[in-house]
Amino acid sequence: MHKRFILTLLLALSLCLGACEEGSSKGGPTVGIVDLSRLVRDSEPGKAANAFLEKTQKSFNDRILALQDKLQANADDEKVRAEFQSLYLGLQQRMQAEEQNVNNVLLDHILRTVKEYRAKQGLSAIVRSEAVLDYDKALDITDMILDELNKKNIEFKAVTSDQPKAEDAKAADAGKEGAGKDEAKAPEAAKPAEAQKDEAKPAESKPAEAKKDAPKAKDEKKK
């Protein structure tokens, strides 16, 4: 099971479970104690969450290993190296996002179940076992909370994908259209330059004509 996933969720539950601790009711306080690690590890929703994360991690690892083999076969190919680095960082970020989403969904499910059970049983508070030095085992309601958790099915779905965002796709299309317009304008912009070349040609021939006339003037003076 993902240790980081369990530790993160237990920390969040430890902070949030205090919301289930309320003042005493008539006839004295009644308290229930739960083992949070068991709720995460042994509940069906907890197992489903872990299975989803393991499957996602394996899928990402397989893609990284496949590209790593390609990189080893083309060690000097900068394009393959850049592709590998981009894929590795992208999948790492996606895995973090998937873990965060699973944590949030499972945390919300556990807290709602605990609060519903406390209200149904008329308990004054439900306390995590990690926060109690010693207690009567008769106060442990972990099994009862597990039963309640297992009555509800939770389907975990990926919140990330390889598909580009709609905004990025639009920007790419806009870039292509802009490039097409620039290419269409290019021939038109070239016309004035060609015209200038044509205009410049007669100007270059004038000095030559002047040189041809010059000898005639000298001959007339000699006469």
Image: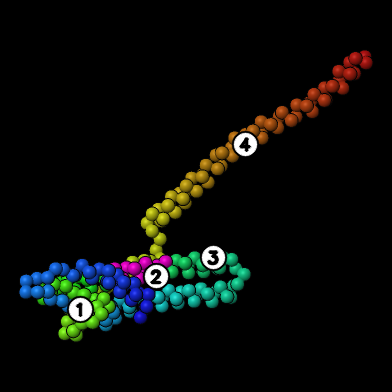
First reached walking from the N terminus: tag 3 or tag 2 = 3
Number of other residues with Cα within 10 Å of mark 4, as a class: few under 14, some 14 to 19, many 20 or more? few
Q: Is the residue under label 2 in contact with that under label 1 (CB below 8 Å)?
A: no
Dot in front, 3 or 2: 2
Residue drawn at x 87%, y 22% as measured from the top left: 215
Return the residue at label 3.
Answer: 82
Nearest the viewer among 195 and 4 is 4
* Secondary element type, mark 4: helix
Residue drawn at x 70%, y 32% as measured from the top left: 201
Residue 99 part of the magenta segment: yes
Q: Which mark is residue 193?
A: 4
Return the residue at label 1.
Answer: 33
Nearest the viewer among 22 and 186 is 22
Dot in front, 4 or 2: 2
Dot in front, 1 or 2: 1
Picture layout, residue 197 above or below residue 167: above
Q: Which residues are magenta?
A: 93-104
Q: Is the residue under label 1 in contact with that under label 3 (CB below 8 Å)?
A: no
Q: Amino acid at mark 3?
A: Ala
First reached walking from the N terminus: tag 1 or tag 2 = 1
Dot in front, 4 or 1: 1
> Where is residue 133 drawn, in percent x and y?
25, 80
Q: Which mark is residue 147?
A: none
Nearest the viewer among 145 and 209 is 145
- Secondary structure predominantly adopted by residues drawn in magenta: helix
State left or right for residue 204 relative to residue 35.
Answer: right
Q: Quadrant of residue 53?
A: bottom left
- For the residues labelled 4 and 1, the Cα–Cα distance comes to 87 Å
> Where is residue 31 drawn, in percent x and y?
15, 76
Return the residue at label 2.
Answer: 95
State left or right for residue 33 relative to residue 60.
Answer: left
